[in-house]
Image (cartoon, rainbow, N blue to C red):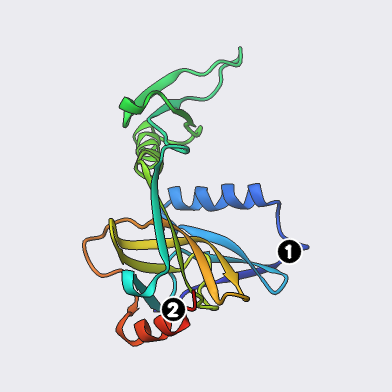
Amino acid sequence: ATTDIYTLSLHDALPIYIMLELLDDAVKKGGEKCVIRATKGKAEIVPLGGNDDVYVFKLDNTISVSNSLSTEDLVTKVKVVGQENKSGQSKVEATLDGLTQYGTRQRIYRRGSDEKLADAKSAAQAILDEDGKVVEEVSVNTPDIPWLRKGHLVCLKAGTSQGSYYVRGVVHNAESLTMTLDLLKAPDDGGDSGGKHRSEEHTSELQSRITI
């Protein structure tokens, strides 16, 4: 499969918050979820999980694995509001609830002037589907793979952490020949993780790099 990567000069790039808003809006309209990363002085917009080779990390080829559950960005309620009237007020047209046992963490979705209420409710539900879950955060310390980048998909089979994860961040340590991966659980599609697993052929390679 071909992965489309959009590149632009960091000098000419839009402010990061505007780019993130545009990417979020694209996802709500059915587009791919992407990340922004810097490469040789340019900003790349890369689809999540666009890598062909998916590395598999197991207990015997990792140095350490730690995980935690986070509710920092959890959304438990989305209110759909209409356009402002002449007095500057907006009417609540629908309310969608999620995991309210974690309290009320509300987000407002404003219905467009030409947007049907059913479409606005679908968009609000998409917000709950995306941000209405307790997030599993995993940190993995492992022998370095220099070409592993932010946005790549990896497979983790270590202890309680099992399945496909997106690389949210990576720190390469040239001195110790190790890297630390900040991982985010990928949606479970019930099947393969999408790329070619490179486990058996690279397990010995990773083990040979463990020097601590």
Query: Considering only vertical position in the picture, is 131 above or below 158?
Result: above
For disc 2, the marked residue is: 2
Q: Mark 1: which amino acid?
A: Leu
Query: Considering only vertical position in the picture, is 199 above or below 187?
Result: below
Of residues 34 and 26, which is closer to you in this image?
Answer: 34
Where residue 112 sits in the image (x, y, percent)?
50, 34
Structural distance between the alpha carbons of marks 1 and 2 = 24 Å
Where residue 35 sits in the image (x, y, percent)?
53, 60
Looking at the rendered structure, the number of numbered marks drawn on it comes to 2
Q: Mark 2: which amino acid?
A: Thr
For disc 1, the marked residue is: 10
Tell me which residue sits at (46%, 17%) in the image: 91
Q: Residues within 10 Å of mark 1 (few under 14, many from 20)?
A: some
Residue at the far right in the pictured view: 11
Q: Earlier in the sequence, mark 1 or mark 2?
A: 2
Numbered tag placed on residue 140 in the rendering: none
Quadrant of the image occupied by residue 78: top left
Of residues 156 and 23, which is closer to you in this image?
Answer: 156
Q: Residues within 10 Å of mark 2 (few under 14, many from 20)?
A: few
Quadrant of the image occupied by residue 65: bottom left
Q: In the image, 144: left or right of 166?
A: right
Tell me which residue sits at (28%, 60%) in the image: 159
